[in-house]
Image (spheres, rainbow, N blue to C red):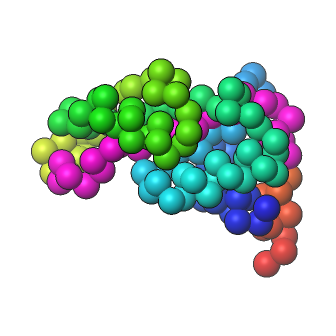
């Protein structure tokens, strides 16, 4: 539980969108970290796969279907569950190595107000423990 909360503290969204749609949203490009986080929300929070939504942020040179299949294997979610965003930041345009993120960055979302606030409580507890 501590590992999952710490991962979310570092890589998750802490904003509740002004109270409108508090959502667990975790983004990363490391498949091992994504697997650990998914194990956490599936086992500790009992989130079924049907409630997990995914987005893949890609660079223009990334193969969309390859990325979908890659993240589908990692997450055990169907490829159709992922929306795709192609992006290039102004700062990295033309500077980033195109092979740096071959499968893009995944964002996993769980739309659940109670879980969002439970996660925020875990993070608050972690921050007070040290």
Instruction: Give the image quarter of residue 26.
Output: top right
Q: Tell me where residue 30 appears, x and y as whole percent.
A: 45, 56
Query: What residue sits 18% from the left and 48% below the top?
Result: 98
Residue shown at 77% from the left, 37% from the top: 47
- The residue sitting at 39% across, 26% down in the picture is 84
Q: Residue furthest left?
A: 94
Quadrant of the image containing the C terminus:
bottom right
Q: Nearer the viewer, residue 72 or 18?
A: 72
The residues colored magenta run: 97-119
Task: Say which residue appears at 64% left-offset and 53% top-offset.
Answer: 37
**Does residue 7 appear anywhere in the picture?**
yes
Q: Is residue 51 magenta?
A: no
Rendering quarter of residue 53: top right
**Can residue 15 be seen by looking at this rendering?**
no
Residue closest to the eye, 47 or 28: 47
Residue 27 percent location from the top left of the image: 52, 45
Front one among 60 and 91: 60
Q: In the rendered image of this protein, does residue 93 appear above or below residue 80?
A: below
Q: Is residue 104 magenta?
A: yes
Above or below for 84 versus 61: above
* Image height of 128 relative to 27, above or below: below
Residue furthest to the bottom:
130
Decide if residue 101 is on the left or right side of residue 84: left
Image position, residue 62 (x, y; %) = 23, 37
């Amino acid at each position: 539980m501590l590992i999952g909360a710490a991962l979310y503290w570092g890589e998750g969204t802490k904003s509740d969108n002004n109270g409108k749609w508090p959502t667990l949203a975790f983004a990363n490009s490391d498949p091992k970290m994504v697997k650990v986080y998914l194990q956490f929300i599936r086992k500790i929070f009992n989130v079924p796969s049907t409630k997990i939504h995914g987005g893949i942020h890609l660079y223009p040179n990334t193969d969309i279907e390859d990325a979908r299949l890659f993240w589908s294997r990692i997450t055990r979610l169907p490829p159709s569950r992922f929306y795709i965003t192609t992006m290039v930041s102004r700062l990295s345009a033309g500077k980033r190595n195109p092979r740096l993120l071959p499968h893009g960055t995944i964002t996993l979302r769980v739309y659940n107000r109670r879980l969002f606030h439970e996660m925020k409580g875990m993070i608050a507890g972690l921050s007070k423990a040290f």
